[in-house]
Amino acid sequence: MTRVETDGSWEDEVATAVARLFTEKLGPAIAADAARYCPENTGALAASIEHHLEGTDLVVSATGGADGRTYAAYVELGTGPHVIRPNGKQALHWEGAAHPVREVHHPGTRPQPFLRPALLQQRGE
């Protein structure tokens, strides 16, 4: 019978190795795939993709753009039909609109997943 003894430091060594794997290989690979799968309009959504560790968890996330805009979840998951009303004004108006309106009944948007396919991508090694 073979007996193996450790000094207890193996747990720290494994945790360090996993953290390195997450931050140096897996996180960048998932983020790169997400940016590649990302629908492109202005490029702000792809540019907002980042990865980091929270404790022992790898987090890959996207916000959606500059100026505090956070629309990544709406792109990833889509939206149902909803009403758009003015915020702080009495009416909505945009270039090309025939006239101002009090509300718009939006039909919703289809999902355009980019984070989930990147996460589920089969990886080697």
Image (cartoon, rainbow, N blue to C red):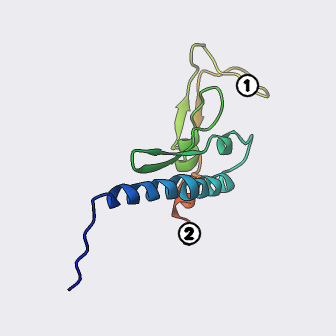
Query: What residue is drawn where x is 63% and y is 58%?
Result: 33
Residue 99 placed where, x, y %?
A: 73, 21
The quarter of the image holding the C terminus is bottom right
Q: Return the mark for residue 123.
A: 2
Query: What residue is drawn where x is 63% and y is 40%?
Result: 48
- Farthest residue in the right direction? 96
Label 1, residues with CA under 10 Å away: few <14, some 14-19, many ≥20 = few
What kind of residue is marked 2?
Arg
Residue 10 placed where, x, y %?
A: 34, 61
- Farthest residue in the top direction? 89
Closer to the chain start, of discs 2 and 1, is 1
Do we see residue 107 in this rendering? no
Of badges 2 and 1, the one in the foreground is 2
The correct choice, above or below, for 82 with respect to 102 in the image is below
Q: Return the mark for residue 94.
A: 1
Do we see residue 95 in this rendering? yes
Q: Secondary structure at mark 2?
A: loop
Q: Nearer the viewer, residue 122 or 111?
A: 122
Q: Secondary structure at mark 1?
A: loop
Q: Nearer the viewer, residue 109 or 105?
A: 109
What kind of residue is marked 1?
Trp
Q: Return the mark for residue 68.
A: none
Quadrant hosting residue 25: bottom right
